Image (cartoon, grey):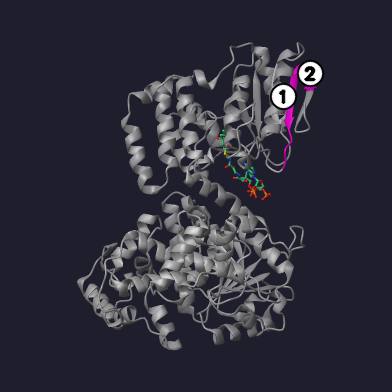
Amino acid sequence: MNDLVRYALDGNVAVLTVDNPPVNALGIGVRTGLKEAIERAIADPEVDAIALVCAGRTFFAGADIAEFGKPPASPTLRELHDVMERCPKPIVAGIHGTALGGGLETALACHYRIAVPGAVLGLPEVKLGILPGAGGTQRLPRLVGVEKAIEMICTGEPIGARQAHQMGVVDAVTEGDLREATIDYADHVAAEDHPLPRVRDRDRLIAEAARRPEVFQAAREHYAKTRRGLMAPQHCISAIQAATEMDFEGGMRRERELFTELLNSDQSKAQRHFFFAERQARKIPDVPRDTTQREIATAAIIGAGTMGGGIAMNFANAGVPTVIVETSQEALDRGLGVIRSNYERTARKGRISDKDVEARMALLTPSLEFTDVSDADIIIEAVFENMDLKKEVFAKLDIIAKPGAILATNTSTLDVNAIAAATARPPSVIGLHFFSPANVMRLLEVVRGDKTAKDVIATCMDLAKRIGKVPVLAGVCHGFIGNRMLHAYFDQAYALLYEGCQPRDVDKAIHDFGLKMGPFAMADLAGLDVSWRIRKETGQTQPIADRLCELGRFGQKTEAGFYRYSQYSRTPQPDPEVAAIVEEEGLKLHDTRREIDAEEIVNRCMLALVNEGAKILEEGIALRASDIDVTYVHGYSFPVYRGGPMFWADMLGLDRVLETIKGFHAAGHGDVWQPAPLIERLAAEGSSFQDHDQAGG
Ligand code: 3H9
């Protein structure tokens, strides 16, 4: 065949082994090799059956995403599946690792499927802004019914082999050697001489669902709420519905139309960009992948507050024994109590078992003794955001921690170099900035100090994956990547209030743009008192927010902030008292108030992110524009279907971005609207942040 597909004979079974590392993506080479191999097996009179397996760590992880956007090359996946499904000799897929997307679709085009117990199967295309475009929306509902197919396809969440067996997606689960088991299975079904089962012919569940079209409307409403703004889940539902309204060929044609529409959409371009951005973010040019790492078998967290507790949960979830240190028994009890109730809530939702709750709690050792961290491989400080306090903690850790331990600070803004300088071992000091709630938010900003050792960085980037986080490397500056940009964003949000908006105008525009919540609802959730205290300490003012705080309006926790809240609901209600303060303070700065439309609100807030992001990029605080995108999607709920703020700017076109920024500057909105030189340069060259990333920054 070709060098990606090996052909061998085992008795009367042709064994096709695909070997296309790292994940056996079904690129053109694999498709060509497979088609030729199947045709050869069909033509060979000695062959009675075909076993299809993959080498390496996984079965096919899907179509080759890097091929999207290029002209389709024949044989396409669908053409290949046609050859497979019509093959007169049984084809058995042997599945290990992950059978995802086009990978599972290929398995569904085989006559039989067997899997090892650890295999995982799914159709995650929706996460790339597309739908399963090689028959997945037509074949899966024929096997598992419409409801289960909708759930799997619209969430993109995979299932394990045993569940897949129960649902009828695989025919058997094998504990033994997969290759041998697949050959045996193929041999066995060939001997039985039954008509070959083809998923496309199974119409019973489809016919049943055709009588209940209301299922589709309910699904549309559900995913419009839970996947707000995303086109792909709605298109997935339409494609599955087509399976109940048309014959197989008609359904396939409809699936193709919907797939093409999605593939060409800006949403899918953004989501595919994001897929590669997440993976790119793990790569650090001067820290090669094979850098020797420090072993992390145990951890310690200083501080059992909201942040410390959330961080500790990440380690317990990953099975890492963790000591949590506090200064008072009361704080320790409170912290551990919150962790337990978080776990119990998850157990009530059925996501973990009661046994898991106890196992995870057992991994956490509460302590009032600082010296109890002395054996930990990594110690993460999560105390109050105050430089003197942090320095004091690090000076103590320097004395107590074992040699080689990684000393991490969870500071969200402070100078990691200054914190490192409080120790005699700055190479072992790093920033690990978790986002609140730390057990939920996926972003981890890994802050590299001037002296942080490469093995410490490599260890932390890998550790992030182990504890379920997406790491982004940042350099040292006030607020690093995320919070420095957030500062610029909030400045504009406030400026809009002074000029003429009310909090709900700004929040609505930002929410409609796709963020989970606007800046003022977010501030109410986080609490207004923290930034008020910092402003007072640093001699700054923000008159509207200061006045709200003086009235004891600290946000949701006091049932009043920028909005009013009832005791029972977190839904923000506009408050005339706030409206009056906003107007009064606005008129102190401007002669009149003006109407500001949603487009200006979005541009002011989002382009503030982009302009600051470009400066961060130029200064080398972020390695890539795509790292900034990862930061904003995973840390600040920026809509993934816009790809992140920098990708969004690319889609607008940097010439348009520059013109709008210059317009804000000319309109007197302040010197923050001096365009970042990088934007000026890229716009002049007619290029984009993506081009800048590809050129190596
Ligand atoms: C599809 O199938 C469409 C069809 O319905 C219809 C077509 C007509 N293609 O994640 P990792 C690369 S859409 C190309 O770090 P892990 C990845 O970029 C597809 N490349 O490993 C990375 O490269 P690098 C549906 C891919 O062990 C390397 O492999 N399938 C693909 O943490 C390692 O990846 C999916 O959406 C791909 N399909 O996780 C599955 N997949 O080293 C997408 C991976 O240069 N993949 N790469 O950075 C995954 O979810 C994970 O990669 C997987 C492994 C779970 C498989």
Instruction: Pick whichever of labels 1 and 2 is earlier in the sequence.
Output: 2
In depth, the one of 402 and 665 nearer the eye is 665
Which residue is labeled 2 in the image?
Answer: 11
- Position of residue 581 measured from the top left corner of the image (x, y, whole percent): 25, 78
Q: Is residue 633 visible?
A: no
Location of the N terminus by quadrant is top right
Separation of residues labelled 1 and 2 (CA atoms): 9 Å
Which residue is labeled 1 in the image?
Answer: 183
Q: Label 2: few (<14), some or many (≥20) within 10 Å?
A: few
Q: Residue at x 50, y 64 (%)?
A: 610
Which quadrant of the frame does ligand 1 lie within?
top right
Q: Are marks 1 and 2 in contact (CB under 8 Å)?
A: yes
- Position of residue 237 measured from the top left corner of the image (x, y, whole percent): 41, 35
Q: Residue at x 25, y 73 (%)?
A: 593
Q: Is residue 44 visible?
A: yes
- Position of residue 300 measured from the top left corner of the image (x, y, whole percent): 61, 71
